[in-house]
Image: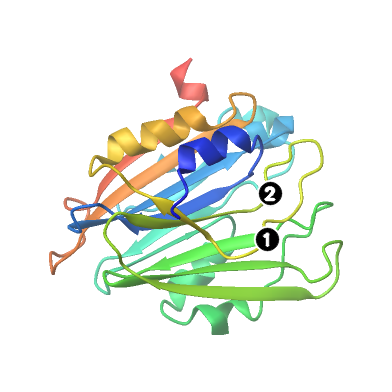
Amino acid sequence: MLTNLTDYLKEHKYPGRGILVGTTPDGEHGFIVYFIMGRSENSLNRIFVQDADGTVKTRAFEPAKLLDPTLVIYNAVRYDYDWQTAVVTNGTQTDALFNQSGFMSHTLSKWDYEPDELCTPRISALIFPDEYTISILKASNGIGSKSARYYFNYPRIPGEARFISTYDGNAESPRAFSGEPIRTAVITNDIKEFANDIWNALNDDHKISLYAAKMPLGGTQWNSDTVLTLIKNRHQQR
């Protein structure tokens, strides 16, 4: 059975950072949704910005209040239009994957979960026109040790997507996401409507930013004109 993602997010207060990759019901477009959430002042003090080449970055909303850029400031999404690929991750592994596009398991074999008190997993997705791969790196025993690395490869199926997040949704005591990326339903071809529904389902106390992109399938070249994007930032909506 396909999961309704908005219902899932309403029931899970703190999934942390989340990646959704899938295909519109008409099969004509693929899409990415990436959101970030936070609990600390340092984490909440962020926005998404997008460069002309499509790169999406986290930036401090108020630079003077940025306490530590480590783990919170990074390139989140990058596109290689020549090779028709996109990379989205929750950390600095974005650049490593972008520079070795197509070799996810080899590249991430050199990476571990994030070095914080929660042993936050690294989640990543590598997107192609006909398929996508999702990965999670997390502490093998859940409390800090060697990393366990998981890779999941999916074909494009119209009206379906896969969702993975860093945490299980418990805001008081976050634990690493477990199991296979969640198989979710996509009921609209309108990426703006879909992204707004996801944004509205996220907990208001913790949500920070959301990025969504819709790219053509069927041979149309991906570029800054054909890939449609949307950014939502909590600080810029007040």
Q: Residue 168 carries which label?
A: 2
Location of mark 1 (residue): 178
Decide: few, some or many residues near mark 2? Use Cα within 10 Å; few <14, some 14-19, many ≥20: some
- The kind of residue tagged 1 is Ser
Q: Determine the residue positioned at 60% across, 76% down.
A: 108
- The kind of residue tagged 2 is Asp
Q: Is residue 32 visible?
A: yes
| Quadrant of the image occupied by residue 100 | bottom left
Q: Can residue 60 be seen in this view?
A: no
Q: Determine the residue positioned at 40% across, 32% down.
A: 197
Q: Which of marks 2 and 1 is nearer the N terminus?
A: 2
State yes or no: discs 2 and 1 in contact (Cβ < 8 Å). Answer: yes
Q: In this view, does 17 lie to the left or right of 68?
A: left
The percent position of residue 45, horizontal first and vertical second, equals 62, 31
Q: Determine the residue positioned at 51% across, 73% down.
A: 152
Identify whether 50 is placed above or below 28. above
Q: Which mark is residue 98?
A: none
Q: Determine the residue positioned at 70% across, 51% down.
A: 70
Identify whether 37 is placed above or below 213. above
| Front residue of this view, candidates 66 and 127 | 127
